[in-house]
Image (cartoon, helix red, strand yellow):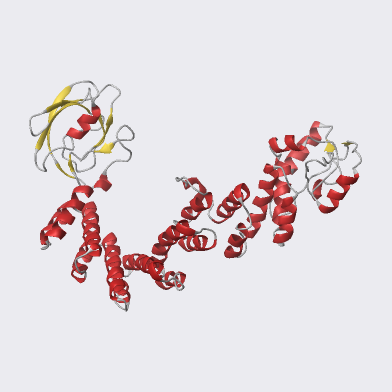
Amino acid sequence: MVFDSAASIFNFPIMQKSMFILVAGAAAAVVAAAAVFVFTGSPVVPVPEKEEVKATAPQSATSQGNVAANPFNITGVGPSASEAKLRPLSFERRQSVERAGFDAADDLDKALGQLAEITAPNERAAFIRGLFEHLATGDRKAAMAALNKFKDNDRATAATSLIDAWQPDARSRFQRDGRIEGFLGYALLDKDPALAADWAQQVLTGDASRELMNRAITDIAKQNPQAALDYGKDLTGKDRADFLRRVAGGWAQTDPEDALAWAGKETDPELRASITASAIRGIADKDPAAAAKQLSQLAPGDDRTRTVERITEKWAGKDVAAAEAFIGTLTDAGDQKTAQRALDQAALVGIGVAIRPSRDGGLVVQDVPEGNNSGLKANDRIVAITRADGQTVDTTKDPREAYGALRTGQRGSTVSLTVANEAGATRTVNTVLDRFPAQDWGRGGFGGGGRRTR
């Protein structure tokens, strides 16, 4: 390769002096086999016994100066800088560039200087990957601090390299739009909430930092409340109040008695009531009945309303009849109204099977849960619905209207379905509408994956 003084073309020390052209097929096979090496060892480029060495062009004075400043430049005949940016890196080239970045990690300032000399995007990415693979093996906070020295595409490459090293499967779970480091922080939550909290503090800023920290703190508090509290020791005002509510909610899921006792020690009456309510909602996530017994601690207001909603919602997801019984124990009209609304959202009335539109018209029964008494079978096609009010809906004309018809009616009322089986034979199925927890529905929406009707 010949060094282009207008736009640098780089290589690394293991390939500085010359390029070798293989002249025998057997020699090529030897090189291909030897090209695989363990990353933690030194890369090896074998040299066959017989080879034809391509002549190199002399360096210009300008390129010689650049070589002194840039140890990655080589001489020889090669593509232009623009061609180098478009051409994929070979396996050996990529490995050597990554290795150079890996080795440079011991002196970050020097590594940044080396990176400044690399202009081809694919080579910059390879160097950064190697650099952060090394940094990921050391102190995590130091690695995240190093990340803040990068911008734009370089920063994205660095961030993904850290997460790939710490949680290799995390990147496959990205589902949101936004900055990639925000994605990565959320991807850490399931596997390592403490690392996610560190990421929120060290890498993210503003709302993104607060949102990720709140999520992480709830999970940390489930296992180690004191460690969770340490993250918020410098917070004040609203930030502190939000933080303590998160701790209370997580803590109460695993140790409700201690969480409530801790909340009761808060000296500010308003904050004490707020974090106590958060603790009770945390209890409801695991044991709605136990949470209901603590409801008397809460005075009327927003915190009590949210807690009644949470208890009802969680209970309806486990036992609809028990949730209805809970509503019957409430003496305050406002609480009753709140709880009934929550029940209606968490467990609406329907026939309790997953359906999807059929290509032949009508609605196809996709799934019938165990214990369902609708009289329907998987792959049945519903072609008509006669509601409790006597109105008949032809499902082959407007599946969406038909879907709505299956959600209309009082619990205990009967709907009559005209059903065709896979062979085309029709029958009438009379089924009683009931409440079914939302969490029991099939995944997907109307027209995609089926939905359990309510």
Look at the picture and state if 336 lies above or below 393: below
Dividing the picture into quarters, in which one does residue 48 lie? Answer: top right
The reply to whether residue 292 is in sight is yes
Viewer-closest of 137 and 248: 248
Residue beneath the point at 73% across and 34% down: 83
Q: Residue 126's x, y, as percent?
A: 67, 47
> For the view shown, which residue lies furthest in the front direction?
237
Q: Residue 85's x, y, as percent?
A: 70, 38
Quadrant for the N terminus, please: top right
Residue beneath the point at 91% across and 36% down: 55
Residue beneath the point at 83% across and 35% down: 22
The reply to whether residue 37 is in sight is no
Dividing the picture into quarters, in which one does residue 371 lie? Answer: top left
Dividing the picture into quarters, in which one does residue 226 lie? Answer: bottom left
Viewer-closest of 136 and 37: 136
Number of numbered discs visible in the structure rendering? 0
Viewer-closest of 119 and 229: 119
Left or right: 183 in relation to 219: right
Quadrant for the C terminus, please: top left
Look at the picture and state if 226 lies above or below 442: below
Left or right: 416 in relation to 214: left
Q: Residue 333's x, y, as percent?
A: 11, 59
Look at the picture and state if 65 lies above or below 416: below
Viewer-closest of 46 and 283: 283
Q: Residue 281's x, y, as percent?
A: 27, 63
Left or right: 122 in relation to 216: right
